[in-house]
Image (spheres, rainbow, N blue to C red):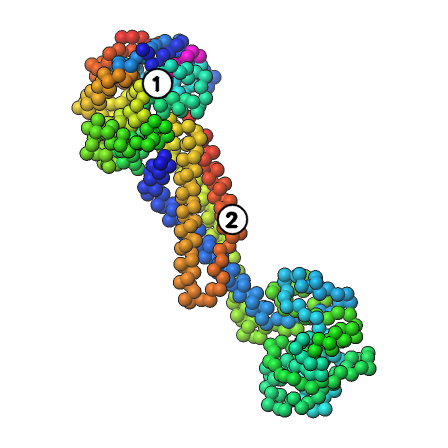
Amino acid sequence: MKNKLIIKSFIRRKIFILYFILSIIIYSTLLVINVTLTNLQENRKKNIYHNSLASLHESNDYYDQLNSNKLIGDVKRVVYFDNLEDKTGRYYFLLDPKIDNRVLVYEDRSLKDDFIDIYLCKKDYSNIENTPYQEDTLSFSFNDTEEEFSFNINKLYKSKHVNSIAVSSKIFAKLLKLNDGYDYTFKLYESETNIKKNIKNVRILTSYTEDEMLISHRINQYITVLIIFDVMMFIIFIIIIFIISNNLINDLNKNINLEYLLGFNNLQISNNILVRLVLLNISSIIIAIIGSFIILSLFKIFIKIDYFLINYYLLGIMIIILIIENMYVVIKSFRRLR
Amino acid sequence: MSVVKLQNVEKTYILKNEYIPVLKRVNAEFECGKLYAIMGHSGAGKTTLINIIDGIESFNSGHIIINGKDISNMTKFEKALVRNNDIGMIFQDFLLDDYLTAYENVMLPMTINKKFKKRAKERAWELLKEVNLSNRVNHFPKELSGGEKQRVSIARALANDPKILICDEPTGNLDEKNENKIFEILKNLSQMGKCVIIVSHSNEVLKYADIAYELKEGKLIEK
């Protein structure tokens, strides 16, 4: 009950309402900016991931290391055929110039040993989809081996990336043994520049089309603007917190003095100051979280927002700053006591 | 029986390396059932004296016994407890919480008092009734006149049923009519068994005082 009167007295002040509204505006702006930023960054990641394919050749096996690298995903072991024998002459595009006129080979566990699936980019796919490809036989080989691998075509698929084929697990295992070194393909979560810094000898096979490039550029611009805005808001948040703290010390001075004269001890007075501050901060943070969810729900009508998660890292920093503020107010108020 | 005993109390301020003695071996006893007036010119040390009795200010030597307890060597926590249990304070500028209603202001000191915590609300209403403010219980200080504010302040001072009431210029901000009303209330309280100590400039207090002191050159002299 003792806190009830302290709270009543505090929340009836115009200054409390002012600080409360100000805090809600700042906290919710920060949260909304951060959720939007997270969404844009995730979208950028998705965009890059969806559009990208990179390859790597190493003399040692780096499969596990690549799998644990958070900048990349979908790491696959691959091999390359150097030669293609195609009597129909329709499948020349399998020797892709992007991979030095070789044929990219993946593993597909569902395939039978004498069949392959072919993955083609849109243009090549449309050239061949209406032909009786099931009757065609294709033979592949390595430059430095005499062994030849012949297959019938099981199915054609569209692919966004380089043209490739898939073989059965048994064949793929055999090809791995014949391969000189280790080859992988993977998708990227980060920009090419970042990946090149992180993984030596990486070769980017596909990235954006012009349209995709434009979208990506726009997303990058938004992200930059939002980061600047975010930093500015954070600085404003710290300044406002400092101003509120100092004003609170002055506003509460009379109350602290009164409580002291009425026989509240120092511990009770400190507790009362803390109750007021916690009420102001916690209630405004809770309302800001609810408010930002409402704002984001409204945003969702107009823009795509997939991630509604609160940035706990930001929330943690905000709470630490508020705890420091609270301690500052309590200590400074305490010193003013006679 | 005396509830406030001052034994050789001395207080000296040090300002810019200059020693300014305010209280010089002050001895006095204040009993229940009496109204005491402490007069003196501005700067004589009246407020210092009552702040020392309240335990708000420290003193250099001597003893102060409040309701049988020597506060001389008490910690801040113990002094706060004495202020809450044994002393009711009334101030010139009322010192009410502007954002609490009259009865909430009266309840405030009871919120930390074991004796009255549970029935604080009822007691606040009763006390406001006693000072003829039953029609003002839900009013905020800004909605009350100066005299009414001081009566709320008196009700608050009585909240924890202290034996001692210490009033620092209680009528300093009031007109003559309200001044007499407040003194009458304080006189009644002393007749009901409280020890009322009033520090005042106003000679009007002498009409109501059982014993009057003058604080002169650091000494408390009975008039």
Q: Quadrant of the N terminus of chain A?
A: top left
Name the front one of labels 1 and 2: 2
Where residue B168 appears, as percent x and y from the top left, is: 30, 21
What chain does badge 2 belong to?
Answer: A
Q: Quadrant of residue A159?
A: bottom right
Question: Which span of residues is magenta-colored?
Answer: B61-66
- Residue A245 visible from this viewpoint: yes
Residue where numbered disc 2 is placed: A316
What chain does badge 1 belong to?
Answer: B
Residue A111 sits above or below residue A287 on the image? below
Residue at screen point 40% across, 51% down: A287
Residue at screen point 43% across, 29% down: A266
Which amino acid lies under the numbered mark 1 shown in the image of this protein?
A: Ile
Residue where numbered disc 1 is placed: B50
B197 sits to left or right of A231 = left
Where residue B212 appears, as percent x and y from the top left, is: 27, 11
Residue B134 sits above or below residue A205 on the image? above
Question: Closest to the observer: A34 or A135?
Answer: A135
